[in-house]
Amino acid sequence: MTPLTLSLDSVHLSDEQFYQLCQNNRELQFELSSKGKLIIMSPVGGESGNREADFIIDLGIWNRQTGLGYTFSSSTVFKLPNGANRSPDATWIKKERWEALTLEQRRKFPPIAPDFLIELRSATDDLETLREKMQEYMDAGVQLGWLINPQLSQVEIYRTGQDIEVRNLPTQLSGENILPGFSLSLSPY
């Protein structure tokens, strides 16, 4: 099932209204684009869910070993500086940036752009929509992002101020200077 997108052209949801919409409809997962589109996300299937969990586990193990930051699942909504409210599949934020937020900011939808994120294209995801989402992340201040595309056996690497790098699978990805020592081996799906 593809996500349902509603245009909110003349309607503006405040941060609190969007938060309450999500709280009042916990069985649904919402995102809000920087262009004011309300997106009702569809659940993923078993294959995508398993891959997503593996990415979060790998990132979480690295983070526990280094203690450099905090790892988040796809259930976390981030209030980005560009007005979007997004939920990447796996996310990491530097310790000092996360701890600079107030307790109230951490409890709701944190007003912060992640330092690193992973988006995994599921069988029903439109590639161009995901690429627009990745660009929105980068415009909001994300430093490094990976768009993993099993359908084309590729990964797109997004870096601040650089052209997108496309690699064919299998490949070994590096966390570079954002996630020192982190690497992820991707094989064709």
Image (cartoon, grey):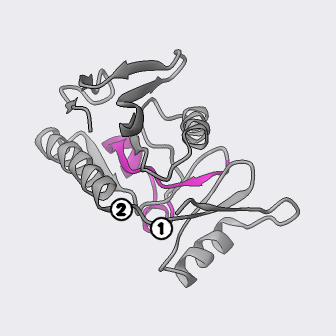
Quadrant for residue 129, please give it: top right
Question: What amino acid type is highlighted by mark number 2?
Answer: Gly
Label 2 neighbourhood size at 10 Å, few (<14), some (14-19), many (20+)?
A: few
Does residue 116 appear in the picture of this structure?
A: no
- The magenta span reads 83-109
Instruction: Give the residue pinned by disc 1.
Output: 104
Where the C terminus falls, by quadrant?
Answer: top left
Q: Residue visible at 63% across and 51% down?
A: 84
Residue 101 is covered by the magenta coloring = yes
Give above or below for 72 relative to 93: below
Foreground pick, 6 / 84: 6
Q: Nearer the viewer, mark 2 or mark 1?
A: 2
Q: Residue at point 28% right, 55% down?
A: 47
Between 110 and 99, the residue placed more toward the observer is 110
Q: Specify the amino acid type for callout 1.
A: Glu
Q: Secondary structure at mark 2?
A: loop
Could you tell me residue 42's position as x and y percent?
50, 65
Provide the secondary structure element on which disc 1 rests: helix
- Is 113 in front, or is 26? 26
Give the mark, 2 or 1, whose residue is nearer the N terminus.
Answer: 2
Does residue 135 sit above or below 93 in this rendering?
above
Q: CA distance from mark 2 to mark 1?
A: 33 Å
Which of the two residues, 179 or 47, is positioned nearer the viewer here?
A: 47
Above-or-below relation of 82 to 173: below
Magenta includes 36? no
From the image, tell me which residue sits under label 2: 45
143 relative to 41, above or below: above
- Residue 91 appears at what percent x and percent y? 37, 46
| Residue 137 visible in the shown view | yes
Q: Position of residue 32 (x, y in %)?
A: 64, 58
Q: Position of residue 165 (x, y in %)?
A: 44, 18
**4 lies left or right of 66:** right
